Image (spheres, helix red, strand yellow):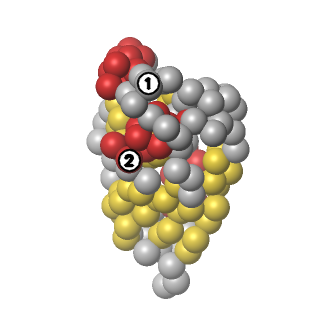
Amino acid sequence: MASRIVHLELRPRGRGLLDFTEKVAAVVAAGELAEGLCTLFVRHTSASLVVQENADPTVQSDLERFFARLVPDGDRIFEHDAEGPDDMPAHVRAALTATSLGIPFAKKRLLLGTWQGIYLYEHRHAPHTREVVVHLG
């Protein structure tokens, strides 16, 4: 049985969480391996990956309000603002979250909990195209 690498292209519309659980589940279901570890890696420094509740959308809005308080846009403490006032805060947000996740799978199904989903967390305000590498091994 061979490992597999797939590149997913995601297009968040701006800051916030984008659920892409079903795309990852489809990669796992189509793979040769029945069980193993699904590793996800986002190839950007101003976006991240999180496993978060997928049932109540107020979790996402609460998370965003927390990060807005913790790392406000335009904070004068930051020098790096080459791409605008959300530039350095986006890098800090990514550093505080994760650029990679490991999720086990069995019987070609992700072993997520009942209320868990896989999200790209976009930290910039403008729409972007983001790439997530999925490795099954």
Q: Position of residue 71 (x, y in %)?
A: 38, 28
Query: Which badge, 2 or 1, comes first in the chain's sequence?
Result: 1
Q: Which residue is mark 2?
A: 95
- The residue most toward the left is 113
Q: CA distance from mark 2 to mark 1?
A: 17 Å
**Residue 38, picture quadrant:** bottom left
Residue at screen point 45% across, 35% down: 78
Q: Nearer the viewer, residue 104 or 101?
A: 101
Q: Quadrant of the C terminus?
A: bottom left
| Mark 1 crowdedness (10 Å alpha carbons): few <14, some 14-19, many ≥20 | few
**Residue 7, picture quadrant:** bottom right
Inspect this view and state whether residue 85 appears.
yes
**Residue 75, picture quadrant:** top left
Q: Position of residue 125 (x, y in %)?
A: 61, 27
Query: What type is the residue that disc 1 sits on?
Result: Asp
Residue at screen point 43% across, 53% down: 99
Q: Is residue 77 above or below residue 5?
A: above
Q: Is residue 101 above or below residue 123?
A: below
> How many numbered discs, if any?
2
User: The residue tagged with tag 1: helix, strand or loop?
Assistant: loop
Residue at screen point 37% across, 67% down: 37
Q: Is residue 59 above or below residue 25?
A: above
Query: What type is the residue that disc 2 sits on?
Result: Ala
Q: Position of residue 100 (x, y in %)?
A: 42, 57
Q: Position of residue 112 (x, y in %)?
A: 34, 47
Q: Which residue is mark 1?
A: 75
